Amino acid sequence: MKVAIFCESAADEAGIRILVDALLGMPSEPFELDKFRARRGWPSVPNSLPAVVRHLYYQTEADALVTVADARGSPLHSAKCDPRQADPKCRLCYMRQIITSTSQRLGPVPNRRPLLTAIALAVPAIEAWWACGCNPHATEAAWERDRATGASAPVHIRKLKQAVYGTDRPQLALETSRAVEEARRVAAQIGELERHFPAGFGAFAQDVRTWAERSKEAGTPA
């Protein structure tokens, strides 16, 4: 399966690729988005999503798009979020709405199947995922408790970065190598990531797992 991954940084994408493959149960075929690489971070990710979706659908043979962004201080996604009218403060709702509205405007292309999509929100940042299983405070529930008492997202994230990278301002090479290392560890116990990050990762994991099932039903290799 050809899967494009679009995140806030190339380091995030390297780690997410490992998690996606673990969820699929097989290696995915990388599909690069180099032309969009200069425009990363929030809000560049959601701002670029319409162009990314159109590019993948009309100009490539990509089967799927994975998008992951950091929640930072934004609200945690919950069952109270209305899928018909996304809360702009909920980053997961916001990105889902963008992809849905863009996909609905795509025209038919001969022999082109719909682009599969899966969106995740790392709470409060992707470093919390990389710390899963090592840091008992690296969970969505722990962050929500801290946030309720007035904890600062930037301060909390700097502490996570320091714990994962040894610095809160890692160079890209270090950030990538550590993301890959920790993603491999987390992928081996992917259920723990789903348990500790049910809102931002749980539904995403279910979506990705269905891709392999759909491919089998369609009689095409995943």
Image (cartoon, rainbow, N blue to C red):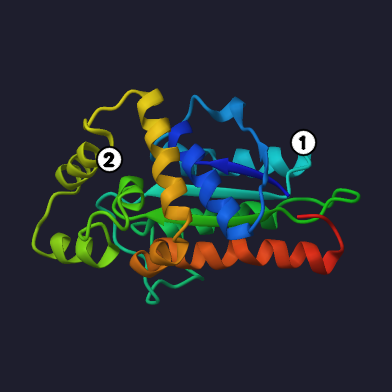
Residue type at mark 1: give it.
Gln
- Whether the residues at callouts 1 and 2 have beta carbons within 8 Å, the answer is no
Above or below: residue 57 compared with residue 11: below
Name the residue at 48% across, 53% down. Answer: 95
Q: Residue furthest right?
A: 110
Left or right: 102, with 221 as reference point: left
The mark closer to the camera, 1 or 2, is 2
**Nearer to us in this view, 41 or 124:** 124
Q: Quadrant of residue 117?
A: bottom right
Q: Is residue 86 visible?
A: no
Left or right: 84, with 216 as reference point: left
Q: Tell me how far mark 1 sits from mark 2, CA to CA.
A: 37 Å
Name the residue at 66% across, 53% down. Answer: 26
Query: Around disc 2, counting alpha carbons within 10 Å, would you say few (fewer than 14), some (14 to 19), or many (20 or more)?
Result: some
Q: Callout 2: helix, strand or loop?
A: helix
Residue 103 image point, x, y percent: 67, 54
Where residue 59 is drawn, which disc sits there?
1
**Nearer to us in this view, 93 or 63:** 63
Q: Residue furthest bottom?
A: 79
Q: How many marks?
A: 2
Q: The C terminus lies in which quarter of the figure? A: bottom right
Left or right: 93, with 1 as reference point: left
Left or right: 95, with 77 as reference point: right
Residue type at mark 2: give it.
Val
**Nearer to us in this view, 201 or 117:** 201
Residue 125 image point, x, y percent: 32, 48
Residue 171 image point, x, y percent: 33, 23
Residue beneath disc 2:
164
Residue 173 image point, x, y percent: 40, 24
